Image (cartoon, rainbow, N blue to C red):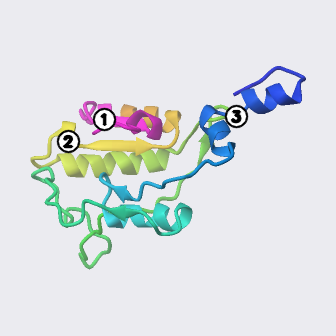
Amino acid sequence: PNVHSRLPLAKHLLGTSLLGVLMEAPGTRVQALRLSYRSSGAILSLPSRLFYRDVLVSAVEGYEHTLAPAWSPETLTADEEGAPCPPVCVVGVTGRQTRHSERSWSNFIEAQMVADVVASICSGAARVQDVGVMALFRRQVQLIRQLLRRRDLGAVRVGTVDDYQGQES
């Protein structure tokens, strides 16, 4: 938070979240939550390795996931030979980031690719309410929504990480 005070103690106390103050208190013990009930191991492995010293474990492995009827891992392919796409599929695009403000960016080519992938998923029996798109920046969200509306896919949920945080989608 922004603190407008010349007192160092005020800046320290008011400039730190309550959780931050509690974490610095003597005798504070930290208990890491290791089980994730929302992500498969394939998705969880990267943040676990980068930020949690490989201690995060997926609790959904072996659980039967219900996918939209027209969607299967084979719907999109990872390569031209038709190898199945893994649970996390990265599609490289060339495009240029456009800065719209201090904190928001968009990339038209990337948004167009997202719209193409969503259209592919929704072209079969998949219902648009079963598809969600997450983007990092608000302007990218707006651009993706605009492109999806042009394809009559405006009901697809598109939001930022904060929009999805703590919700079931």
Q: In percent of the image, x 85 and y 20: which residue is there?
A: 5
The disc label shown at residue 127, or none: none
User: Does the stretch in magenta take in 119?
Assistant: no
Whether residue 112 is visible, yes or no, is yes
Kind of residue indicated by mark 2: Asp
Relative image position of residue 39 (x, y in whole percent): 32, 56
Q: Earlier in the sequence, mark 1 or mark 2?
A: 2
SS for tag 3? loop
Mark 3, Cα crowd under 10 Å, few <14 / some 14-19 / many 20+, is some
What residue is disc 1 on? 157
> How many angstroms separate mark 2 from mark 3 (CA)?
39 Å
Q: Which residue is mark 3?
A: 16
Whether pointer 2 and pointer 3 mark residues with C-beta atoms closer than 8 Å, the reply is no
Q: In the displayed image of the protein, which residue is found farthest to the top?
A: 4
User: For the residue labelled by badge 2, is the local secondary structure a helix, a strand or a loop?
Assistant: helix
- The amino acid on which the numbered mark 1 sits, given as a three-letter code, is Arg
Residue 163 in magenta stretch:
yes
Q: Mark 1 packing: few (<14 Cα in 10 Å), some, or many (20+)? A: some
Q: Residue at x 52, y 34 (%)?
A: 139
Sequence-wise, the earlier of marks 2 and 3 is 3
Q: Looking at the picture, how far across and down is residue 66, in whole percent?
A: 13, 53
Residue 81 appears at what percent x and percent y? 26, 79
Quarter placement of the N terminus: top right
What is the distance, in whole Å, between disc 1 and disc 2 at their CAs?
9 Å
| Residue reaching furthest to the bottom | 81
- Give neighbour class at mark 2: few <14, some 14-19, many 20+ (Cα, 10 Å): some
Labelled disc at residue 130: 2
Q: Quadrant of residue 35?
A: bottom left
Disc 1 versus disc 3: nearer the observer: 3
- Look at the image and give the residue range highlighted in magenta: 148-169
Q: Nearer the viewer, residue 58 or 137?
A: 58
Q: Decide: is 165 above or below 80.
A: above
